Image (cartoon, helix red, strand yellow):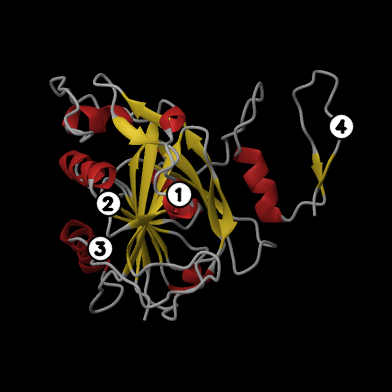
Amino acid sequence: MYQKKNKAKNNKEIVYQNLNPFKAEEKKYKLYKDQITDFSELVDVTALSEEELNVNQIVKIGSTYRFPHPQGVYLVKEFLSFEDQIRIAQLCLNDYILPPYRTNLFIYDQQQKFEAETTHDDNKYHFNHKIRWTNVGQQYDWDNRKYPQQKAPVPDPIQEISQRANHLLKIQPQYTAEAVIINFYQDHDYMTGHLDDAELDQVSPIYSFSLGLSCVFLIGGPTKDEKPLALRLDSGDLLVMSGPSRKSYHGVPRVINNSFKHGQIYNPSPLIENRNEEYHVLNYLRSNRININTRQVY
């Protein structure tokens, strides 16, 4: 357990004691009111010179970056084109939150209303922010941390980008996405460090696609006693956890506000039957983040 010391006299600085290295990095990057974050150690590969890449033993081939530790971490910048980002985000917002797929709202009464958490504005978008995740493919049992037999089909667009990722990196001969978790982040949200250890297949890679706002992504080792690597992930990026990193702690302590810089303009359009058009999707991505991660279960 960690202990929080008293605030400094300026009422801004918070100092923690007895933190493991992973938790310390989470606290370092987490958003706090009236506190400036030190991003000096955040790795933004696009800002590194060739010399800095060599010093840090980061191997760059085209738009793909391989990191020395944890082994098996790859980052492919702009893997998804802008058109792909809009198309897939539109499916996430409109279709992948509906049956037969299951969101976190399954724990509530189906008749329960969430007007206070729902944005419905022709000039913005339509989305219920009470939805934090949706599960596509094999349905994960979050309480018991296992995969029961229930499953829904993995949509072709997600299957296609997963197999395209595997073909690019050639990590294994074939790859079929069997379970997909889609996380929806507002600009103040975060995800604490965890392991993806419920799948029987702990060898095949996890492919993780970022849409919308950038984030700080931490990935460390098999325990939280290792200081994690802090990476900046931008919209369209592909992050891969393979090899030893497949069994490493990882998390998202920070979504970076005002970081989605695409300047594409779509004509305004009304929301019809609560379905987001390209105009609304772009507005959503300017203030939110979507993460799609695919894995093989068996």
Q: Marks 3 and 1: CB-CB under 8 Å? A: no
> What's the CA distance linking mark 3 and mark 1?
34 Å
* Residue at image point 64% right, 24% down: 33
Q: Residue at x 74, y 56 (%)?
A: 20
Front tag of 2 and 4 = 2
In the image, residue 219 sits, relative to residue 28, either above or below, namely below
Q: Which mark is residue 6?
A: 4
- Locate the N terminus by quadrant: bottom right
Q: Work out which quarter of the rendered image holds the C terminus and state it.
A: bottom left
Q: In x, y percent, where is residue 156? A: 16, 61
Q: What is the CA distance from the residue labelled 1 to the residue labelled 2?
A: 20 Å
Mark 1 or 2: in front is 1
Residue 286 position in % (x across, y down): 34, 28
Q: Amino acid at mark 2?
A: Tyr
Residue where numbered disc 3 is placed: 162
For the residues labelled 3 and 2, the Cα–Cα distance comes to 16 Å
Q: Amino acid at mark 1?
A: Asp
Residue at mark 1:
109
The circle drawn on residue 96 is 2
Q: Earlier in the sequence, mark 3 or mark 2?
A: 2
Q: Regarding mark 3 in the picture, which secondary structure is present there?
A: helix
